[in-house]
Amino acid sequence: MKNLKHFLPILAILSISSIITACLSNDGDESHVYGVSTWYSKDSVVGGSHYLFNVEAHATNGTLTEMNISSYDPIQGLKDLAKVPLSGTKYTYEYDYLVPILADSVTEVQLRVQIKNSEGETWNATKYLKVFTSDFRLKEITGLLIYEKPSINHPNALNFMGGGAQPINTTLEEKDSIKNLIAYYDRLEGGDDISRAFYTLSQEKNYNVYMAKMSNFDYAGATYKSVRNAFQNAADLGRSVTDLKQGDIVIVGLIDGNSVRTPLAAVRIVRILDEAGKEKDCYELNVKTMQRQQ
């Protein structure tokens, strides 16, 4: 087991269980502020899991003022996790660390804790964790414009064949090549208002495209498993979605003749542009396909 950096272990036996309690100091020098943390025999975790730990802060001179918790890994860089105001001379803080799902199968992540006192002294410690990832974050395509009225340089649909998200113009594509797509559904006859819907008429053998709005889906943290689970568990899948608005998330996928559900993408509506006439009416979309983020 790896302990915190500059870690002086104290062993305590409680009944038949063994807990390792760590008390750290600043490079071996006597310090007036320090932390004690209980770490269990665990140096590796799985992406997407919870890693619960606590830190007991002490000040033998002055009073405690602040505890900062951060993380570092070579993929996400340095991230601030918590900033906790402190008071008095002793304080125990418990933190629930949501382990990130990273692109690499194994990544070393550093958990960093800093404690400060009123005398300007600080105490720093680092816990090293190996993060194993069987899930992965998704590749994103941003700034896609899909127009209500197709014309040259004005695509009106997204084609998900091949695992990507390719804007296409359904009036220019050959009928047989239009597969796995979503497009505008022009429900409004006449008038200038933009249609607030997507639909699909795509069909290849027994495969059909279905979709659903997901109001609570975490698009920013979307992973292969989260999109797959959302599509497989959606109760209101259909051939179209209506009443769309800025910020909506649409999960798109296939359902075959055996009712097997296969996700294709998560689509986020960034904004809806509704101008006079229909020539420039469009959606701006960000799309996360089921491909691994590089």
Image (cartoon, rainbow, N blue to C red):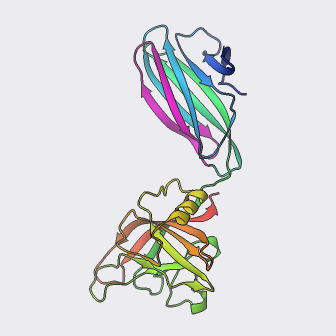
Magenta stretch contains residue 138: no
Camera-side residue: 199 or 5? 199
- In the image, is residue 268 above or below residue 173? above
Which residue: 57% across, 92% down?
A: 175
Q: Nearer the viewer, residue 43 or 152?
A: 43
Q: Position of residue 211 (x, y in %)?
A: 49, 72
Residue 196 in the image, given as x and y percentages of width and height: 35, 75
Q: Is residue 180 visible?
A: no
Tell me the quadrant of the picture where the C terminus can be found.
Answer: bottom right
Asked if 14 appears above or below 238 in the picture, the reply is: above
Secondary structure mostly taken by the magenta-highlighted segment of the chain = strand
Q: Is residue 93 magenta?
A: yes
**Residue, x 44% and y 86% (percent of image)?**
150
Residue 5 placement, left or right of 178: right
Residue 92 x %, y %: 48, 21
Q: Which of the pair 84/98 is nearer the observer?
A: 98
Instruction: From this view, report whether residue 167 is shown above or below residue 178.
Output: above
Q: Which residues are magenta?
A: 72-101
Picture quadrant of residue 166: bottom right
Vertical placement of residue 210 versus 3, above or below: below
Residue depicted at 52% across the width and 63% down the height = 233
Q: How far from the left and from the top, in percent, is residue 218? A: 48, 55
Tell me if residue 22 can be seen. Answer: yes
